[in-house]
Amino acid sequence: ETVMTVVRLGRLLRAEHDLKVRQPLSVLHIVSRDSGLLKRVEAFQDLVLDELNVKKLAFGRHDTRLATLKAKPDFKRLGPRLGPKVKKAAQVIAAMDEESLEKLAWGEKATVTVDGEAVELESADVVIDRIPKEGLVVAAEGALVVALETALTEDLKLEGAAREIVNRIQNKRKND
């Protein structure tokens, strides 16, 4: 199931960013704080490489290496709890450090100070946006974050062109 999720997210990224499947890409980054998930994907590494047409998988535990995290409050959830302090809370949430944002992104709690009062935030209290670092496209689901490197070397371009030629020849043979 974990491997299927990684492949589905990788295909989604390719489709959303017009990265053709026949075009090989250099690296797929897979990030999770759950080392068990990473080990499950690593056990089926060849399948993932083949399904997504990437040369290498890179595993990690911090998604801040792939994307900049930004947060904004879920006003429907925080409004009833904080009342008039919700606007100040929004400013505090927008200014949170990466470590706290990463905790919230992984479903952990974080504490912020609003008007001198400690407020405990749950991951559902905020909306986390991942802004990909340059040269990456990023998707996340549950405890997994997946990123594709989009830069194409000359070798990758040539391999993609060769795959395209082979595909066209095979299609021509089928139709004749």
Image (spheres, rainbow, N blue to C red):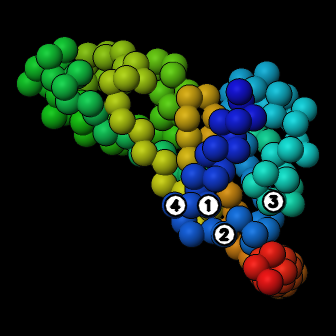
Q: Amino acid at mark 3?
A: Val
Q: Nearer the viewer, residue 142 or 164?
A: 164
Amino acid type at image mark 2: Lys
Asked if disc 1 and disc 4 are in contact, CB closer than 8 Å, the reply is: yes
Q: Residue at x 75, y 72 (%)?
A: 23
* Residue closer to the observer: 99 or 56: 56
Quadrant in which residue 59 is drawn:
top right
Q: Specify the label residue 54 is tagged with.
A: 3
Q: How far apart in space, not on screen, are marks 4 and 2 (Cα)?
A: 10 Å
| Pointer 1 with pointer 3, Cβ within 8 A | no
Asked if the residue under mark 3 is in contact with the one under mark 4, i.e. CB atoms within 8 Å, the reply is no
Mark 2 or mark 1: name the one nearer the start of the chain: 1
Spot occupied by residue 128 in the image (x, y as percentages of width and height): 42, 39
**Residue furthest front as drawn:** 176
Q: Quadrant of residue 90?
A: top left
Tag 4, which secondary structure?
Answer: helix
> To which residue does mark 4 refer?
16
Q: Which residue is mark 1?
A: 14
Q: Which of the image's four quarters has the N terminus?
A: top right
Q: Which residue is mark 2?
A: 20
Circle on res. 150: none
